[in-house]
């Protein structure tokens, strides 16, 4: 049996997320290191007003995820696998030992800045629940204003990206066809589609001066649902995941097929846990948010003992 650390993407953010386990030394160390790398106090990015900015959101998700993962691993064995949805790939790479935390902070700051500059307003993403993939793809093909399939989260849950007008029209058609919900997500950027090809190429250039290592843990790509071991493939995955669709449902299935029976969702939120439960029918899914630290660590130790 194995353990997977799952790191959430944009949309999971909430004010105060950097205060999760705030008195733990790992949290304090991450806040200090991130502030040094940025040249500004990272705690100032954690307010409701600051989190209106894509750069702030992505930096807070990175810091929160790394700090919590390091605290969990202080008194429990490391996970077998790590994976992240979109920006969650960066804390996953840090915990896998493939990317230094300081470099991740600088890259994520640049990533968020590029995405925000490309689409400061007028675009976003909408989650659609209750339709099949074929129906969603038919709606995309029929759209008069372009809309793109961005996330495959479950058999009947998908996320599309595009302009405000395109998303509004798509949501209206989806609901008319029987969708249970069509909800705008808390982000202003049309991620995981060709609209971000140019910012992704700029971010890839920023990776030229960054040293990456082979992951020491299993790094499971949320874009390809494959284990990545080679440095060049990892660099490509991190740089271009902003413009590639996320296949999170396939990622969860691959983890389960590889023997993962404990999925721990790193803070903030519990969105990934909800998506995982239908897949992990014989496993345990738990979110750090709202859970006791000692309980989480006991679950991790038990799973590793079972594997041995």
Image (tube, rainbow, N blue to C red):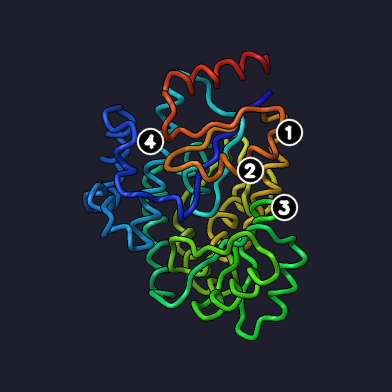
In the rendered view, tell whether residue 156 sits above or below residue 228: below
- Where is residue 41 drawn, in percent x and y? 22, 49
Q: Could you tell me how far apart the alpha carbons at marks 1 and 2 are, in whole angstroms?
A: 11 Å
Mark 1 or mark 2: whose residue is earlier in sequence: 2
List the residue tagged with mark 4. Answer: 67
Q: Nearer the viewer, residue 151 or 184?
A: 184
Instruction: Indicate the secondary structure of the residue bearing disc 3.
Output: loop
> What kind of element bears circle 4?
helix
Please name the residue that numbered disc 1 is placed on.
258
Q: Earlier in the sequence, mark 1 or mark 4?
A: 4
Question: Nearer the N terminus, badge 2 or badge 4?
Answer: 4
- Determine contact: label 1, label 4, CB under 8 Å: no
In the depicted structure, whether residue 121 falls above or below residue 92: below
Residue 220: mark in rendering = 2
Bin the neighbour count of mark 3 within 10 Å (Cα to Cα): few under 14, some 14-19, many 20 and up.
few
* Residue at which label 3 appears: 155
The answer for how far apart the CA atoms under marks 2 and 4 are is 20 Å
Residue at 57% x, 38% y is 82
User: Badges 4 and 3: C-beta atoms under 8 Å apart?
Assistant: no
- N-term mark: 4 or 3: 4
Q: Secondary structure at mark 1?
A: loop
Q: CA distance from mark 3 to mark 1?
A: 20 Å
Q: Earlier in the sequence, mark 3 or mark 1?
A: 3
Residue 28 x %, y %: 27, 34
Q: Is residue 49 left or right of residue 75?
A: left
Element at badge 2?
Answer: strand
Residue at (47, 64) in percent of width and height: 203
Q: CA distance from mark 1 to mark 4?
A: 26 Å
Q: Please tell me how crowded label 1 is: few (under 14), some (14-19), or many (20+) other residues with Cα within 10 Å.
A: few
């Amino acid at each position: 049996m194995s353990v997977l650390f799952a790191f959430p993407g944009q949309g999971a953010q909430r004010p105060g997320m950097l205060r999760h386990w705030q008195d733990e030394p790992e949290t304090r160390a991450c806040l200090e290191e991130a502030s040094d790398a940025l040249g500004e106090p990272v705690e100032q990015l954690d307010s409701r007003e600051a989190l209106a900015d894509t750069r702030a959101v992505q930096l807070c998700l990175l810091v929160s995820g790394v700090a919590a993962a390091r605290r969990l691993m202080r008194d429990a064995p490391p996970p077998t696998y790590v994976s992240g949805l979109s920006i969650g790939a960066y804390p996953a790479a840090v915990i896998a030992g493939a990317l230094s935390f300081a470099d991740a902070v600088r890259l994520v700051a640049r990533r968020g800045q590029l995405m925000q500059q490309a689409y400061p307003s007028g675009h976003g993403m909408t989650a659609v629940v209750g339709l099949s993939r074929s129906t969603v793809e038919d709606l995309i093909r029929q759209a008069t204003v372009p809309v793109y399939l961005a996330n495959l989260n479950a058999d009947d849950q998908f996320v599309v990206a595009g302009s405000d007008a395109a998303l509004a029209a798509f949501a209206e058609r989806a609901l008319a066809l029987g969708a249970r919900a069509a909800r705008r997500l808390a982000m202003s950027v049309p991620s995981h589609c060709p609209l971000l090809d140019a910012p992704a190429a700029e971010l890839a250039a920023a990776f030229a001066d960054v040293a990456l290592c082979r992951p020491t843990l299993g790094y499971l790509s949320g874009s390809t649902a494959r284990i990545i071991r080679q440095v060049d493939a990892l660099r490509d995955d991190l740089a271009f995941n902003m413009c590639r669709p996320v296949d999170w449902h396939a990622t969860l299935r691959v983890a389960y097929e590889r023997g993962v029976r404990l999925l721990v969702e790193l803070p903030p939120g519990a969105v990934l846990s909800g998506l995982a439960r239908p897949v992990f029918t014989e496993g345990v899914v738990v979110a750090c948010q709202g859970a006791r630290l000692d309980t989480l660590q006991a679950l991790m130790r038990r799973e590793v003992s079972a594997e041995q």
